[in-house]
Amino acid sequence: MSASIKKIVAVAALCAAASNVAAQDKILNLYSSRHYQTDEALYANFTKQTGIRINRIEAPEDALIERLRNEGTASPADVLVTVDAGRLWRAEQLGLFQPVKSAVLESRVPEHLRHPDGLWFGFSTRARVIVYNKDAVKAGEIRSYEDLADPKWKGKVCMRSSSNMYNLSLAASLISHDGEQKTEQWARGVVANFARDPKGGDTDQIKAVAAGECALTLSNTYYYARLVKSTKPDEREVAAKTGVIWPNQDGRGTHVNISGAGVLKNAPHRDEAIKFLEYLAGNDAQRYFADGNNEYPAVKGAAVDNPALAALGAFKPDALNVSALGRNQPVAQKLYDRAGWK
Ligand SMILES: [Fe+2]
């Protein structure tokens, strides 16, 4: 073999090796606080469509954000998937995300469910609804979040703590619509109606309502749907004893929050990360993503096939940009504290 041919062979071998590395290199490092069975199909389908392998680290929301903070510029993470606009906002405040411009994401994800500069995008929504005891409250007797502060419900309201992200996001939306002063008055009114000090999660509140310990509470829709679909008869009984009211249907609509994702600032695989977000906005992924936790697809027209959600019926969601939920959060916490909502 002549020297020049040897050289060509060597270069060809090198090229082949390099393309092998590139093929192997098609990976995506995902940090996710989601842990639903349908997510397996969601990820497997992405790999099938794109050839990009997903390495996944799952942990609770706040732990993931803390981990990203500690890893800093050395972080291998490409995408953070988490719940609640308030948490996405916290990650944003810590400078963890980079802006993404994508025609697919901008056309598929409604404007009010994503960050204005593309730092994060909402892929499913959950509504915060009033849950009532059917023996104690007649449907139509309460119609809005504001009504929860009506003195007629004294001793009848159960709530989880004010430091909980869902209640912070709700107060943040009230601040946007009613102003800070009115929202504080509202919080004081709700506290005056407490049947007990705040404790437990959303499901615990629904159970207390079913047991008659209180007549009214607030819950995210997926907790209620889980009870409806439960394999445990006593949990289905809890759902049967309670009803759901879509608040503020006569006005701005029911408060909704998102589960969403953003591309991380130091993402080693930026292109793959954007591909993944675009994939999440596709019709199939929308169904998996939302249904995995009994949520609603963010993308209009994406089909849902969830009888528990279908039974709750259609509703008008609040069109407030969810980025306000994070922005108003510090004010919301202070106002809850002043109102004595523990
Ligand atoms: Fe939750």
Image (cartoon, rainbow, N blue to C red):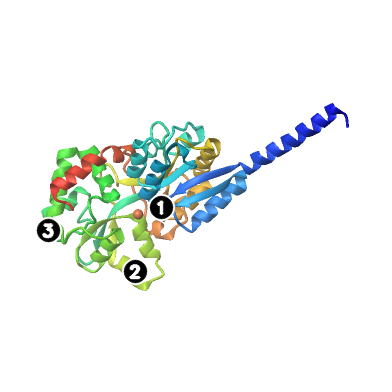
Q: Who comes first in sequence, dot 2 or dot 3?
A: 3
Q: Position of residue 65 (x, y in %)?
A: 38, 45
Q: Is residue 19 visible?
A: yes
Secondary structure, mark 3, is loop
Q: Residue furthest bottom?
A: 233
Which kind of residue does numbered mark 3 sit on? Lys
Question: Can you say whether 85 is above or below 207 in the image?
Answer: above
- Marking on residue 295: 1
Question: Is residue 51 shown left or right of residue 85?
Answer: right
- Residue at 36% x, 64% y: name it: 227
Secondary structure, mark 1, is loop
User: Is the CB–ligand 1 distance for label 1 below 8 Å?
Assistant: no
Secondary structure, mark 2, is helix
Which kind of residue does numbered mark 1 sit on? Glu
Question: Is residue 147 shown left or right of residue 165?
Answer: left
C-alpha span from label 1 to label 3: 32 Å
Q: Are marks 2 and 1 in contact (CB under 8 Å)?
A: no
Q: Which residue is mark 2?
A: 235
- Residue at 52% x, 37% y: name it: 268
Q: Nearer the viewer, residue 223 or 228?
A: 223
Q: Position of residue 176 (x, y in %)?
A: 24, 38
Q: Which residue is mark 3?
A: 154
Q: Position of residue 220 (x, y in %)?
A: 32, 54
Q: Who comes first in sequence, dot 2 or dot 1?
A: 2
Q: Who comes first in sequence, dot 1 or dot 3?
A: 3
> The N terminus appears in which quarter of the rendering?
top right
Q: Quadrant of ligand 1?
A: bottom left
The local crowd at label 3, few if under 14, some if 14 to 19, many if 20 or more residues have their Cα within 10 Å, is some
Q: Position of residue 278 (x, y in %)?
A: 51, 40
- Residue at 28% x, 37% y: name it: 327
Which kind of residue does numbered mark 2 sit on? Glu
Q: Nearer the viewer, residue 68 or 26?
A: 68
